[in-house]
Amino acid sequence: MAADYKGFSTRAIHAGEEADTRPGSPGDVVVPIHLSTTFIWDKPGVAHSKFEYIRTDNPTRHAYETKLAALEDARYAIAFASGLAAEHALMQAIFRPGDHVIGFDDLYGGTRRLFDEIIDGLEVSYVDLGVEGEFERAFRPNTKVLWIESPTNPMIKICDIAALAAKAHQRGILVVADNTFLSPYFQQPLKLGADVIIHSSTKYIGGHSDVLGGALLTNDETLYEKLKSIQNNCGAVLSPFDSYLNIRGLKTLAVRMERHQSNALEIARFLSGHPRVTKVLYPGLPDHPGHDIIKRQATGFGGMLSFEIEGSLTDAEEFLSRLKLFSLAESLGGVESLIELPALMTHVGLEEQTRRAIGISDTLFRVSVGIEDVEDLIADLKNALG
Ligand SMILES: *Cc1c(COP(=O)(O)O)cnc(C)c1O
């Protein structure tokens, strides 16, 4: 089905959603929100359709999974109640006590909490995978998984997914890639060698800051069956309404991502030229250390950037209080621009030493650039920087 459509937007709009033209059907063009928790059987032992009970499968969720799989060119997609529920199910499937995982040092904080506090008996090494040789140095006989994101946040680090996947596979370990930040529109990690993709669809896929969701994608049938069984037995499924919102989000993903990116690039250039700004982290800038790698492995740079201003925490707070358009909030990927201070917000849970080692100072901001008019966004930043 997915292969029938070539272009990304055509797949985003049509895959998984063929109009129902069977006799007697109203002929919905858009997949409806199916709320029925149970489905009729023709007789004992013979279900009427492939649907039996809502936790196991649901038509709206199924349509969303089909669409998402088409966009990542994956054989299988499973939609979860949140990104972290998806990650937890994956960890249940792939880790045994005593296993070792190598993670990017700037991984999503919730992923680090699952590794450090929730999954028992896991050994974890956090290393800067943007640096040549770090993966090899961290590798141990009990290493089972390489867990990456590219770009990361808030340090917007890039790693070479294909090169790392090749090294990991030489050693017989699994490669997990969180593709939340670039979305399938800009990057498709399965094609670069990853074995599993994670999405927090709460971000760009939903795209409007109004739905929580997560997903896992893979081409591995055995792993898929295991994940599906864990999900069915534990129950962290995406609801029909949330599935519908994610379907709706995917349809405009391409146009939104283009606009997020062009706005982010202009803002990054503006900030780079501002005397109060000491650092701008955006992989679309030619001087970003990961610029050449991201150009090779992705078709865009995304809408997330970080920057640092001179001064102290007080200066950072004063700057934030002067902004009118950028909302001070965590999360990302919605149509509205958000800004946050990782040291006191998303990354406050890290020990100060870890935060410093990663490079998170008291005046480092993370920005989720929205799709407003960029002139207005730049005027707001200019005014607040003074
Ligand atoms: C938000 C996020 C998650 C967690 O997803 P939730 O939907 O909030 O559970 C995981 N990875 C990344 C990169 C994220 O940004």
Image (cartoon, rainbow, N blue to C red):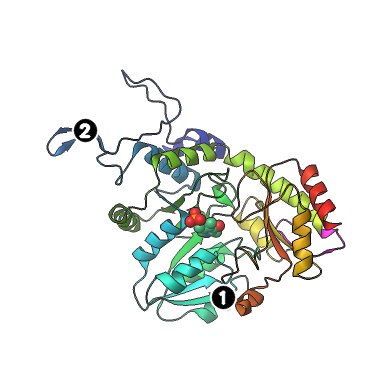
The residue wearing badge 1 is 127
**Horizontal side of residue 251 vs 287, given as left or right:** left
Residue at (40, 76) in percent of width and height: 122
Decide if ligand 1 comes within 8 Å of the CB at mark 2.
Answer: no
- Amino acid found under the numbered disc labelled 2: Ile
Tell me, yes or no, whether the highlighted magenta stretch contains residue 282. Answer: yes
Residue 317: quadrant of the picture: bottom right
Residue at (37, 49) in percent of width and height: 237
Residue 56, position in %: x, y? Answer: 29, 46
Mark 1 → mark 2, Cα distance in angstroms: 52 Å
Which of the two residues, 227 or 321, is positioned nearer the viewer here?
321
Residue 158, position in %: x, y? Answer: 63, 64
Residue at (36, 79) in percent of width and height: 98
Task: Give the magenta part as a residue range.
Answer: 272-285
- Amino acid found under the numbered disc labelled 1: Val
The residue wearing badge 2 is 40
Nearer the camera: disc 1 or disc 2:
2
Which of the two residues, 358 or 138, is positioned nearer the viewer here?
358
